[in-house]
């Protein structure tokens, strides 16, 4: 049955133009919304992939890296860069992610005195990142030579950090390293890109 009972019921040209315009707008809005949502999803997916594959974010827990990194801060790690002496790295230990500083690499010989002075390959190590030197939790014998594919790490807060000085922790194998800490991104007012370290031979 026809909706129109007389010629007077037929829409005017202006009404037809208005309806066509409204439908075009709705179609255009829907297309724009779809494109926007798609773009946001692609961007989010790229961000997740970038974070997981290249720049994983790690939350600092505990006080072992004070005063340089504090509990609750968030850092980004570079998975593509090989760690060097002096770098802070993210590593896995007992299903936890920890942050420690690389002190010695494969083949290095390290010695730590009772007052906490570190000697690397016979040379006293310059450690401006350490506020209070200390022997800390240590049960290994010095001098100690780092084995192949291992990394000797310590926290900057030497008195409280449990690290490679303790035999149960030991040196870190390659496969346990998540990446080199590249920047601090949170809190936002403490954003910092860490300088590349100069290795001591």
Image (cartoon, rainbow, N blue to C red):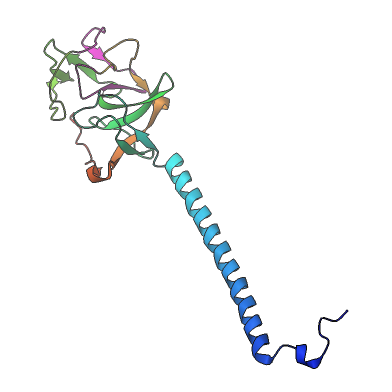
Residue 35, image quadrant: bottom right
**Left-right relation of 168 to 125:** right
- Residue 122 in view here: no
- Residue 30 in view here: yes
Q: Residue at x 12, y 17 (%)?
A: 117
Quadrant that contains the N terminus: bottom right
Determine the main secondary structure of the stretch shown in magenta. Answer: loop
Residue 58, image quadrant: top left
Residue 138: in magenta span: yes
* Span shown in magenta: 136-160
Q: Residue at x 64, y 76 (%)?
A: 23
Q: Nearest the camera: 119 or 39?
A: 39
Q: Nearest the camera: 60 or 32?
A: 32
Indicate the position of residue 128 as horizontal and vertical percent values. Answer: 13, 30
**Left-right relation of 194 to 176:** left
**Left-right relation of 42 to 107:** right
Indicate the position of residue 46 as horizontal and vertical percent values. Answer: 48, 50
Indicate the position of residue 146 as horizontal and vertical percent values. Answer: 29, 18
**Left-right relation of 34 to 137:** right
Quadrant that contains the C terminus: top left
Residue 56, image quadrant: top left
Q: Is residue 140 above or below residue 198?
A: above
- The extreme right residue here reads 1
Q: Nearest the camera: 25 or 42?
A: 25
Image label count: 0
Indicate the position of residue 86 as horizontal and vertical percent values. Answer: 22, 30
């Amino acid at each position: 049955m026809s909706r129109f009972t007389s010629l007077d019921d037929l829409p005017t040209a202006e009404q037809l133009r208005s309806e066509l315009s409204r439908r075009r707008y709705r179609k255009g809005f829907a297309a724009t919304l779809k494109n926007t949502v798609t773009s946001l999803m692609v961007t989010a997916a790229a961000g997740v992939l970038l974070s997981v594959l290249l720049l994983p974010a790690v939350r600092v827990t505990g006080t072992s890296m004070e005063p340089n990194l504090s509990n609750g801060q968030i850092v980004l790690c570079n998975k593509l860069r090989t760690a060097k002496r002096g770098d802070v790295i993210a590593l896995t230990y007992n299903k936890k992610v920890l942050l420690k500083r690389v002190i010695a690499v494969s083949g290095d010989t390290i010695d730590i005195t009772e007052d906490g002075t570190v000697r690397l390959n016979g040379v006293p190590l310059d450690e401006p990142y350490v506020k209070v030197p200390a022997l800390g939790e240590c049960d290994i014998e010095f001098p100690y030579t780092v084995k192949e594919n291992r990394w000797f790490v310590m926290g900057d807060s030497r008195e409280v950090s449990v690290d490679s000085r303790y035999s149960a922790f030991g040196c870190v194998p390659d496969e346990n390293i998540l990446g080199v800490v590249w920047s601090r991104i949170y809190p936002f007012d403490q954003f910092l890109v860490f300088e590349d370290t100069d290795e001591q031979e």
